[in-house]
């Protein structure tokens, strides 16, 4: 018997959004961010306005949750365009999101609150 395993899908974390042309934007993912998967919670770097994976210990703005990556992006060696959920009303499955390695419950709660302020609600 063959067992098949289905992987993640682009935007698979999304439960509902009011209108994709309103909730999504194409942004610049900062060089060095690495290979990021759909559902990665992102922070926005204050200087330059580029996005990168949420980094709770940072002090450059990326410590604050600012969006969720819609589709996989490779920004290992250069800036790359990426589509993100930037605003709501939007409802996402919190169990499908990708948090930084080692993120504490308090950091995840702070990020969840920041996303909710943007209209992105986690359930």
Image (cartoon, grey):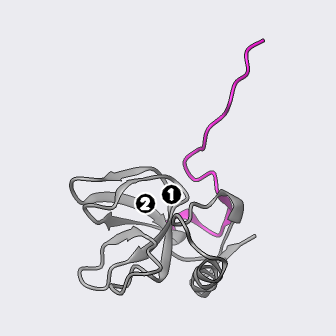
Taking the magenta stretch, the answer to whether it contains residue 3 is yes
Query: Is residue 93 shown to the viewer in this render?
Result: no
User: Is 107 situated above or below 54?
Assistant: below
The residue lying at 53 percent from left, 70 percent from top is 23
* First along the sequence among labels 1 and 2: 1
Residue at left offset 69%, top offset 65%: 94
Check disc 2 and report the residue beneath it.
83
User: Where does label 1 land, which residue?
Assistant: 70
Question: Where is residue 112 drawn, in percent x and y?
Answer: 63, 79
Q: Is residue 80 above or below residue 110?
A: above
- The quarter of the displayed image where residue 53 is located: bottom left
Over which residues does the magenta segment extend? 1-21
Q: Main secondary structure of the magenta part?
A: loop
Q: Residue at x 73, y 21 (%)?
A: 3
Of 123 and 62, the residue lying toward us? 62
Residue at the top extreme of this rendering: 1
Q: CA distance from mark 1 to mark 2?
A: 5 Å
Query: Is the residue marked by circle 1 packed among few (<14), some (14-19), or many (20+) residues within 10 Å?
Result: many
């Amino acid at each position: 018997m063959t067992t098949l395993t289905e992987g993640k899908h682009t935007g698979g974390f999304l439960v509902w959004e009011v209108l994709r042309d309103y909730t999504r934007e194409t942004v610049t993912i900062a060089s060095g961010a690495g290979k990021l998967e759909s559902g990665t919670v992102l922070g926005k770097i204050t200087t330059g306005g580029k996005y990168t994976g949420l980094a709770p210990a940072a002090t450059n703005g990326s410590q604050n949750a600012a969006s969720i990556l819609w589709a996989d992006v490779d920004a290992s060696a250069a800036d790359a365009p990426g589509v993100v959920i930037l605003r709501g009303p939007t409802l996402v499955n919190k169990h499908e999101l990708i948090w930084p390695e080692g993120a504490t419950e308090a950091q995840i709660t702070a990020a969840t609150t920041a996303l909710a302020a943007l209209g992105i609600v986690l359930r």
